[in-house]
Amino acid sequence: MSRSKVASVGIACTAGAFAAVLAMSGTANALPPESRGVHLTCVDINSNITYSTNGAGTLSSSDPGAPNAQKMKLTSSITAPLNIPANSLTTTILMQQVNGPGSYSFSGTANLPMNAGNPITLGPVPAVGGRLSTPLQLILKDTSAAAPSATNYSVRIQATFAGTAADIRCAGSQDIVPPATTPNPFTF
């Protein structure tokens, strides 16, 4: 094989490998997952049962890359009062824009199965309306100034078990980690 053919084959292989890497990097714009602490008071507004008072939890983001919507997940200190089947909890997580007027929701029905007594993990649930435009900095909507109610909440959990509907509203805020004086935002 001539030197020019070897060079042509080498260039073609390099170009093919580069194209394959680009094709597989559809998530190249995806940001790494971020986690932030939260504290929530959660009450079922149907039964008036309190599930947590200023309970600690972790809110985590994920980004599967365009065109898929970014997602949020909440691991809470609330323990499951009974066995919870997979994908039986509808979760809504409300976020607010840092340095802007925008508010955003993440919502869906996604959860792993949980046994009674296990911490409740919600999501990951996608951004409502599809992929968020970037760059965007969000924090959990701060509703800590008042008790959870039908209109004051940061997280809502809905489910029906054995014919009984639960509508749990959680009021609270994202943690501030000193020396910061405001919550560290999620970046999308």
Image: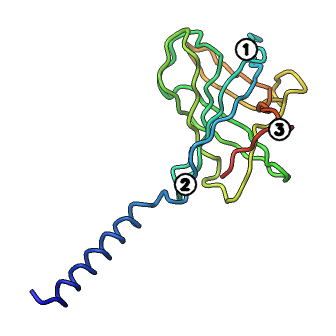
N-terminal-most mark, 3 or 2: 2
Q: Rounded to the nearest whole Å, what is the CA distance between mark 3 and mark 2?
A: 26 Å
Q: Amino acid at mark 1?
A: Ser
At 16% from the left edge and 88% from the top edge, which residue is drawn? 3
N-terminal-most mark, 1 or 2: 2
Q: Rounded to the nearest whole Å, what is the CA distance between mark 1 and mark 2?
A: 34 Å
Q: Rounded to the nearest whole Å, what is the CA distance between mark 1 and mark 3?
A: 26 Å
- Given residues 7 and 112, the one toward you in this image is 7
Looking at the figure, which quarter contains the N terminus? bottom left
Name the residue carrying label 2.
Answer: 30
At 57% from the left edge and 43% from the top edge, which residue is drawn? 33
Name the residue carrying label 1.
Answer: 52
Cβ–Cβ under 8 Å for marks 1 and 2: no
- Mark 3 surroundings: few (<14), some (14-19) or many (≥20) residues within 10 A: few
Q: Amino acid at mark 2?
A: Ala
Is 137 positioned to the left or the right of 60 in the image?
A: right
At 59% from the left edge and 37% from the top edge, which residue is drawn? 108
Quarter-wise, where is residue 96 in the image? top right
